[in-house]
Image: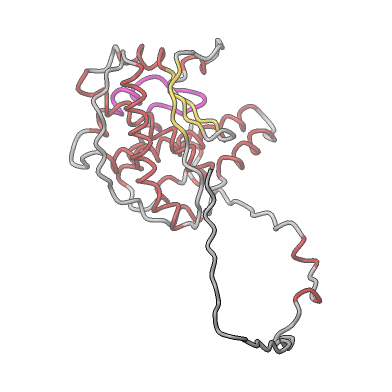
Amino acid sequence: MAAVVAVVSLVAGVSIVVVSPRQPDTPNGVDVATVRNDDLRARPNRVDVDLVDHPLYGVAMPPPVDCALPPLDVDSDASWEAFASEAGSCLNELWIPVMDELRLFPDLPEITVTEEALDTDTEDAFTLAYYESDRGLITVVLPNVREVSEFVPEDEQEIVWLALMGHEYAHHVQHATGILNVSHELRRTAGSQADELETLRRTELQAECMAGVGLRGLTDPDGDALDVVNRHFNEGGDLDTHGSAANRDHWLRAGWEGTTVAGCNTYDAPVERVA
């Protein structure tokens, strides 16, 4: 390896350079080292989240975005991954104005699919998708969605499963705004199973309402997407965890038709509306 050395010759007879000593700078302000404020070492105060009077409810519904979802082949893992990923990107774009209005900048959730059904014999055994707040992860359970897809016409598949993605993304919105953590705490400290289930239904029905927000924001507002989703998801039986069919229909419609997110305030709704 060659090293190149530049040599500069100074030819000017005899040069005398006089260097005067530099005077120390005189400070014009206060030496911050002499100022100590122990309050700066304190942890920030806890922010109380009011489920009934949350700032989220004063935010306008987000404007629609252009979402070009890829065609979905429900039997293909690769197709599902592409569809879920693009749906997630569209939902990110849709909800960003709401987060900006609230001065919140959460990490965007990761979207994934799995071939593994949940190992349980409860109602959750047929979970179509779920959100993990500690991981920021939305997972679509492919064996279950494929089973349901057998009863969904081919030309309605994308709309139905976009609504599912919107519901799970709504849990991410709840987490980012602090609502989900408070809901979990209320369930943990509930005095009875009935109280715990009521809190869970308020949370799930709010997510259903926000799914309606997503559905309207990502599809043709003059189309039949709302009726399609209600027909396939919300005309079935009542669920202790997700509410009656009539209430699921009501809250999805409230998200579709609302002008502010206040339309999704299930925590201020009468008990019969979250049964």
Please tell me whether residue 37 is drawn above or below residue 168 in the rendered image: below
Asked whether 179 falls inside the magenta stretch, the response is: no
Residue 255, percent across and down? 35, 42
Query: Bounds of the magenta span?
Result: 229-247
Q: Give the residue drawn at x 35%, y 51%.
A: 61
Quarter of the view holding residue 80: top left
Asked whether 238 falls inside the magenta stretch, the response is: yes
Please tell me whether residue 102 is drawn above or below residue 12 in the rendered image: above
Q: Give the residue drawn at x 18%, y 37%.
A: 223
Q: Give the residue drawn at x 41%, y 12%.
A: 143
Q: How many marks?
A: 0
Residue 10, percent across and down? 55, 77
Q: Is residue 125 left or right of residue 194?
A: left
Residue 161, percent across and down? 33, 26
Please tell me whether residue 231 is drawn above or below residue 58 in the rendered image: above
Q: Which coloring applies here?
A: secondary structure
Examine the rendering and report whether any part of residue 26 can be seen.
no
Residue 26, percent across and down? 73, 88
Q: Residue furthest front?
A: 13
Examine the rendering and report whether any part of residue 68 can be seen.
yes
Please tell me whether residue 221 is drawn above or below residue 49 in the rendered image: above
Of residues 168 and 248, the one drawn nearer to the viewer in this rendering: 168
